[in-house]
Amino acid sequence: MIRHQKINNLALTMSSNFADADTRRCVGATLLPLLSSLPSNLLRNCNFFAKIALKFRLIVACHDELEPMDQFFSQYSWFDYNAPLPASQQFKRLREEAGWNRGDAEGTQAWEGYRTALVRQFNSTYSSDLDDLEAWHALIRHIGVVELPDTAEECQTLVEGKYINLVDLVDARNDPTIVIEHFANEIELSEYTRANDKIFPRGHIEAGSLLTFLLRRIFRPRNPEGGRLKCEKGKVRNRKRGKKTARQDLLGKAPGSLKLNSRKPATDD
């Protein structure tokens, strides 16, 4: 009983070095079986744990220097993470290799952690401030604009009518040679976003004003031809003209994504 309590206390102490609650839980769960496998004589050896604690602090320091997306995937030590690859593809592979099914507690927790990492990565790469001119310039460069406006308001006007996927912008953060795909309207953006699992969370608590401004309707996109569109599983229905367009729906009811379009953020309904 004393051994078990000591192991739990050690795991709790070591995992507390991480600020993020999800990371603390993951680190604690990883440490428990490792510490439990140690011989009793090592558990009583103060010098041994002093060395372990020092190494662990170095690991924590390295973890804190990672970008948010890298931090998320680093929780899964068994997963072969390749940073240059698109985040959406890597999470899909993580989910498949872990064997998570829809509704699994662990899979749901990982999905929420991934969505949080997307928001944090966007804030870190660009900004959380709608009036940040430098952030706008960085974003606009990634969508292929050469001549940069002088004000944040002019940047917002410049991107009006451009339909870009936000996860693509995050994936392009370290590679200026990546060409961001532009779409003709919000419907095409919606089709692409859902078919490729590139969906940003809507209404996330850590989303800044810049991200909130860029998020648009993905599950109920605006119809450029008039009439109201209703998104159903696997299709977009045009109520005015009675058209149906087949498409994949890989993530069901997951909310969010992006259209660089209007000055006024829209709400998903």
Image (tube, rainbow, N blue to C red):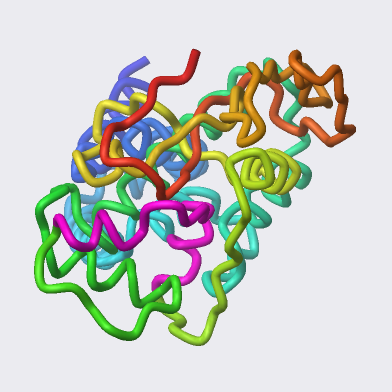
Q: Quadrant of residue 47?
A: bottom left
On the image, the x and y values in percent for residue 130 come to 16, 48
What residue is rendered at 78% in x and 43% in y? Answer: 96
On the image, the x and y values in percent for residue 262 come to 34, 41
Q: How many marks?
A: 0
What residue is rendered at 68% in x and 56% in y? Answer: 89
What residue is rendered at 41% in x and 50% in y? Answer: 260
**Is 174 rendered above or below residue 156?**
below
Residue nearest the observer in this picture, 221 or 76: 221
Q: Is residue 192 left or right of residue 201?
A: right
Q: Quadrant of residue 103?
A: top right
- Quarter of the image with the N terminus in it: top left
Residue nearest the observer in this picture, 113 or 145: 145
Q: Is residue 255 left or right of residue 193?
A: left
Q: In this view of the protein, can residue 219 be seen by the observer?
A: yes
On the image, the x and y values in percent for residue 251 come to 70, 29
On the image, the x and y values in percent for residue 135 come to 20, 64
Whether 129 is among the magenta residues is no
Q: Quadrant of residue 121?
A: bottom left
Q: Is residue 58 left or right of residue 163?
A: left
**Is 208 rendered above or below residue 173?**
above
Residue nearest the observer in this picture, 133 or 24: 133
What residue is rendered at 89% in x and 33% in y? Answer: 246
Q: In this view of the protein, can residue 36 be seen by the observer?
A: no
| Range drawn in magenta | 153-173
